[in-house]
Amino acid sequence: MMTPEASTSASSTSASSATASSATASSATASSATASSVGGTAVPGSAFLTAAAGALPSRTVAVLEAIKHAILAGELKPGRALVETDLANVLGVSKTPVREALKTLAGAGLVTMSPYRGAVVRVVNDEAARHVYDARLLLEPEALHRAVTAGHDWRPAQTALASANRARDQAERSLANRDFHRELYRGCGNPLLVSMLDDLRDQTALVSAVAWRHEPDWLEVPSWEREAAEHRAVLLAAEEGDAQRAADLLRGHITSFVERNFPTKPDPRARTQETQEAQEPQEATGEPR
């Protein structure tokens, strides 16, 4: 049900054109909700989901970016059902742009769809994460080597790196890192290779976001800080024109991320922490910690 504030806002726009009125009322409805329901669970004051409603010329693009940001921020967690009607209500749009956005996200690997369960946020297990990074390991260092040899302009990579450093949350950092890595291979001179790596970008962002949210407390340096330092080293080598060193550093960067977060042999310290968490009492809600 629309709140009185949202109703007043929607009414005040009636003098405008029909299109502008509809967009404003929809945005007001979404942003005024204090606890909207997505998939049966309340999303209090969901800034990520409501910020893009009606804000861009293409409603589908706005919905797509809002849902993607919510997934990478952990607001929509892996395994979460994505009900078209609920998302449309939260975003203040019809089901059509939501449906199209979910199809696009499924193609990008962030969402899985089935005729029985519908759309759900993709669950990232260790094997799936290793497959994504294995594909990157085979392609990305070679693409970077070629880009350095071709004399690629690295200023956009510097911009992306600065954006990652300024990120306010995991989603922004993950998206900025995605843009940084694209700049590493964009100048390789092979459009097919660029397209193949582009197809892995969103899945890589999802894997990174999941890993950061679940990293163990005993790490002396947060994973994202170590990755930022590795990014700077890779970019410095690229800017200096050392193609082989840049490729080797990138290969080590990708490999170390997998070994830290998705090892084939779990670290005994992680197992100890998991055991301690399992022995702790559950929250009052009855949900596991």
Image (spheres, helix red, strand yellow):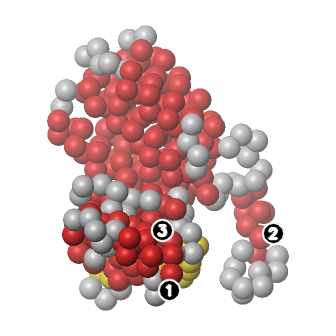
Q: Amino acid at mark 2?
A: Gln
Among the two numbered marks 2 and 3 on one chain, the one whose residue lies closer to the N terminus:
3
Q: Which residue is mark 1?
A: 40
Q: Which residue is mark 3?
A: 31
Q: Amino acid at mark 3?
A: Ser
Badge 2 local density, few (<14 within 10 Å), some, or many (20+)?
few
At 22% across and 65% down in the image, what residue appears?
17
Disc number for residue 204:
none
The answer, for residue 241, to whether it is visible in the render is yes
Q: Is residue 237 above or below residue 216?
A: above
Percent coordinates x, y for residue 142 in the rendering: 31, 30
Disc number for residue 276:
2
Badge 1 local density, few (<14 within 10 Å), some, or many (20+)?
few
Q: Is residue 53 above or below residue 162?
A: below
Q: Nearer the viewer, mark 1 or mark 2?
A: 1
Left or right of 136, for residue 208: right
Nearest the eye: 142 or 233: 233
Secondary structure beneath dot 2 equals helix
Nearest the eye: 157 or 215: 157
Secondary structure beneath dot 3 equals helix
Mark 1 touching mark 2, by CB under 8 A? no
Q: Is residue 150 above or below residue 166?
A: above
Nearest the eye: 283 or 59: 59
Nearest the eye: 172 or 237: 172
The answer, for residue 112, to whether it is visible in the render is no
Distance (Cα) linking label 1 and label 2 = 31 Å
